[in-house]
Image (cartoon, rainbow, N blue to C red):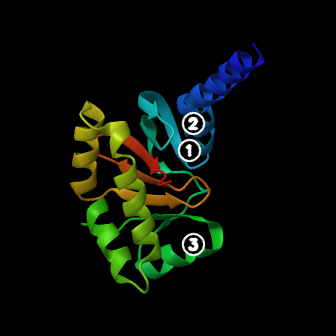
Amino acid sequence: MKCIRFLGLCLAIVAGLVACARNDEGDLRATMNQWFFLGDLEYFKSKTRCTAAVYRLRVVETRRALPVQNNVGDAKAAFSTMGVSAFQIEGFSANDLTDALLLKGRGTMGKQVLAAAAQAVPCFEGTSAETKLRKALTRKGGVLAYDTGSEGAMVLDPVARLVFYVAGDVW
């Protein structure tokens, strides 16, 4: 009888761990709202290893807490000192900005942006949010941001008035 109870407890613990989400939407919204003027939630999915979110923007710019840098050196410096950095260059897409970050120095920020996006694929795959994110990544004039605290990449799409959050873990 004790073995059955022990086995039941073990199964309950495993089930609880499997059902865990990487992020809570309320907590993510609170974090993101420090940097962006968030409106309605358009999409959210969080699993054990990934999170993907799309928010409408009330105002299409970042808040003062997230100053947007306009060159690679300043973006990397903000990333190193603040742990979060936003980057925008006129005529560049988020993909172009990632490439620029990869080519500067050791490319740490660029690698982390790519890792966050790649590892979040299971949370976006096959959804309309994925299609919107692909457009945002290639549209000129967007803002690319990365937060070391949550290991999440963000893309602000000024045309669609959306901000995307992607993050994932490998373990």
Secondary structure beneath disc 1? helix
Q: How many marks?
A: 3
Residue at the disc numbered 2 = 29
Q: Spatial distance from mark 3 to mark 1, Cα to Cα? A: 17 Å
Residue 44 in the image: x percent, y percent? Answer: 44, 31
Circle 1 sits on which residue?
Answer: 32
94 on left or right of 77: left
Disc 2 and disc 1 in contact, CB within 8 angstroms: yes
Question: Which residue type does callout 3 highlight?
Answer: Ala
Residue at left offset 33%, top offset 56%:
142
Callout 3: few (<14), some (14-19), or many (20+) C-alpha neighbours within 10 Å? some
Crowding near the residue tagged with mark 1, few <14, some 14–19, many ≥20 C-alpha atoms within 10 Å: some
Q: Are marks 3 and 1 in contact (CB under 8 Å)?
A: no
Q: Mark 3 to mark 2: distance in Å?
A: 22 Å
Q: Pointer 3: what residue?
A: 78
Residue lying farthest bottom? Answer: 105
Identity of the residue furthest to the right in this view: 2
